[in-house]
Image: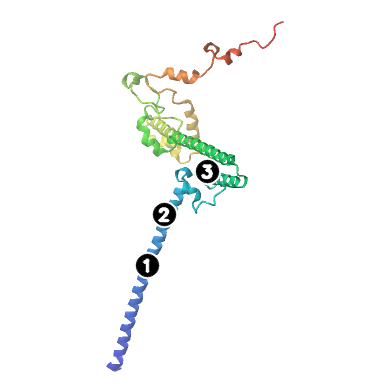
């Protein structure tokens, strides 16, 4: 093979290499472009999702435009998958629609007044339900262990010496300013009481690991008979009603008997109960 024959072959190979490099570069650029487009789409979806979530949890009187928004104007009937605010907004749309149609066809201002009153009652009931939900959430604060850890410094908590957090005799003199006990009926506190009680029991034995396995089964199975027996044995131990020094006997008495009506206090209904209900002959 002569030199003149080899030269075209080399030039062809070089041309193919250049074409391959261009093709690879083009694919890489296309991939980056599609990646950017996909990223933008994900961001737009995330923004749209957040916007919808905000709309779903907003009541109409905070943003009246929601009643006529293109995304929610067709929501005229409350459904199970709607939030509480969405349901109120849907009912309000129906009331407005019926009020306007009634006024147009009957030309009676009483219909407008009735519609406004209905919306006012709806808002009033919503606010009551909202306050009740907030109150329930506050009561359930201790149902979450993280929430309990944030506020437990405001209470006397279970310890190895005093798992149930009751007032000990030495504390009357040594710790008169002790804090009230954490609510022992909440699950995180119950778990802490059980944990400290187990530690107290194990501290009385030399080989605590074997005793733990025999008595508590190391917590492997919460439905094990050993754990059941332990739970049953804890029924006899409880946190007393008052855990501060001195005890607030007056408030406790008011809580138990403060609202009891009596004839001596001038209660007419209670006095009427003392009137004989039979006729003496």
Q: Which mark is residue 88?
A: 3
Cα distance in 3D space between marks 1 and 3:
45 Å
Q: Earlier in the sequence, mark 1 or mark 2?
A: 1
Examine the image and state in which quarter residue 8 appears. bottom left
Q: Is residue 84 visible?
A: yes
Q: Dot 2 corresponds to which residue?
A: 47
Q: Earlier in the sequence, mark 1 or mark 3?
A: 1
Q: Position of residue 181 (x, y in %)?
A: 39, 27
Q: Earlier in the sequence, mark 3 or mark 2?
A: 2
Q: Nearer the viewer, mark 3 or mark 2?
A: 3
In which quadrant is the C terminus drawn?
top right
Q: In the depicted view, which residue is nearer to us: 160 or 101?
A: 101
Examine the image and state in which quarter residue 217 appears. top left
Lateral position of residue 113 relative to residue 19, left or right: right
Cα distance in 3D space between marks 1 and 2:
21 Å
Q: Position of residue 42 (x, y in %)?
A: 41, 59
Secondary structure state at the residue bearing disc 2: helix
Q: Position of residue 248 (x, y in %)?
A: 41, 19
Examine the image and state in which quarter residue 172 appears. top left
């Amino acid at each position: 093979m002569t030199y003149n024959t080899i030269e075209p072959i080399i030039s062809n190979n070089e041309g193919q290499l250049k074409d391959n490099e261009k093709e690879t570069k083009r694919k890489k650029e296309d991939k980056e472009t599609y990646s950017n487009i996909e990223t933008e789409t994900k961001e737009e979806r995330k923004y749209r999702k957040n916007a919808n979530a905000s709309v779903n949890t907003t009541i109409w009187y905070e943003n009246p435009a929601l009643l006529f928004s293109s995304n929610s104007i067709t929501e005229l009937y409350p459904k199970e998958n709607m939030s509480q605010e969405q349901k109120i907004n849907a009912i309000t749309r129906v009331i407005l629609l019926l009020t306007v149609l009634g006024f147009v066809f009957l030309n009676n201002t009483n219909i407008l007044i009735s519609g406004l009153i209905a919306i006012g009652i709806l808002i009033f009931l919503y606010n009551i339900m909202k306050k009740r939900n907030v109150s329930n959430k506050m009561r359930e604060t201790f149902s979450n262990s993280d929430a309990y850890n944030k506020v437990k410094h405001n209470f006397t908590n279970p310890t190895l010496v005093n798992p149930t957090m009751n007032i000990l005799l030495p504390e009357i003199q040594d710790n008169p300013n002790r804090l009230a006990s954490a609510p022992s009926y909440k699950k995180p506190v119950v778990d802490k009481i059980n944990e400290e009680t187990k530690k107290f029991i194990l501290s009385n034995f030399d080989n605590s690991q074997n005793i733990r396995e025999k008595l508590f089964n190391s917590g492997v199975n919460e439905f094990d008979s050993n754990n059941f027996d332990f739970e049953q044995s804890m029924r006899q131990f409880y946190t007393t009603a008052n855990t501060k020094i001195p005890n607030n006997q007056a408030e406790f008495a008011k809580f138990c008997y403060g609202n009891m009506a009596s004839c001596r206090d001038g209660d007419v209904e209670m006095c009427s109960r003392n009137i004989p209900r039979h006729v003496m002959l």
